């Protein structure tokens, strides 16, 4: 199950700056209805590395060819980073879960922007300054 939502798909909504309260509520509900929540999410980055020295007398390592390795890198609060080796058969699953996380995060950011607008509905819309010709 993947999240089929990204900020680009929500671009059809009216700019938050000029939105009415009703429009903001409708846009938020539309975003929520498109969310397909799943536990298949993963934060981090999938990297490809090459290991050159893993054991003594390895011909591939001795020739400089090395062994390709997939690594999931995750940074935690405080700047601490952990890396996890990912077996080749799990790479497509990890990529899908990373994409689900990215899509969910983008949708949540869009919803938060709408909610910011809902907290200040009485403000007059900010108009962009006209460019001088």
Image: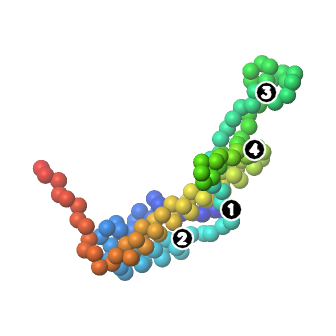
Reading the image, the residue beneath label 3 is 53
CA distance separating discs 2 and 4: 33 Å
Q: Point out the tag, 2 or 1, that comes first from the N-terminus.
A: 2
Tag of residue 34: 2
Tag of residue 40: 1
Q: Quadrant of residue 116?
A: bottom left
Q: Residue at x 74, y 37 (%)?
A: 69
Q: Residue at x 68, y 62 (%)?
A: 40
Reading the image, the residue beneath label 4 is 85
Q: Are marks 3 and 4 in contact (CB under 8 Å)?
A: no
Name the secondary structure under disc 4: strand
Tag of residue 131: none
The answer to whether residue 82 is above or below residue 126 is above
Instruction: Look at the image and tell me whether residue 66 can be seen.
Output: no
Image position, residue 97 (x, y; %): 66, 56
Q: Residue at x 42, y 67 (%)?
A: 113
Q: Quadrant of the N terminus?
A: bottom right
CA distance separating discs 4 and 1: 18 Å
Q: Residues within 10 Å of mark 4 (few under 14, many from 20)?
A: some
Mark 2 vs mark 4: in front: 4
């Amino acid at each position: 199950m993947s999240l089929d939502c990204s900020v680009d798909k929500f671009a059809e909504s009216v700019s938050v700056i000029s939105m009415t309260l009703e429009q903001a509520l409708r846009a938020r509900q539309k975003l929520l209805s498109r969310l397909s929540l799943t536990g298949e999410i993963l934060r981090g980055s999938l990297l490809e590395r090459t290991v050159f020295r893993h054991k003594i007398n390895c011909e591939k390592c001795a020739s400089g060819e090395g062994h390709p390795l997939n690594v999931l890198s995750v940074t935690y609060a405080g700047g601490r980073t952990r890396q996890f080796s990912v077996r080749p058969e799990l790479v497509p699953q990890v990529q899908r879960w990373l994409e689900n996380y990215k899509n969910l995060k983008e949708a949540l950011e869009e919803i938060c922007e709408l909610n910011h607008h809902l907290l200040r509905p009485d403000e007059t819309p900010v108009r962009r300054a006209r460019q001088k010709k």
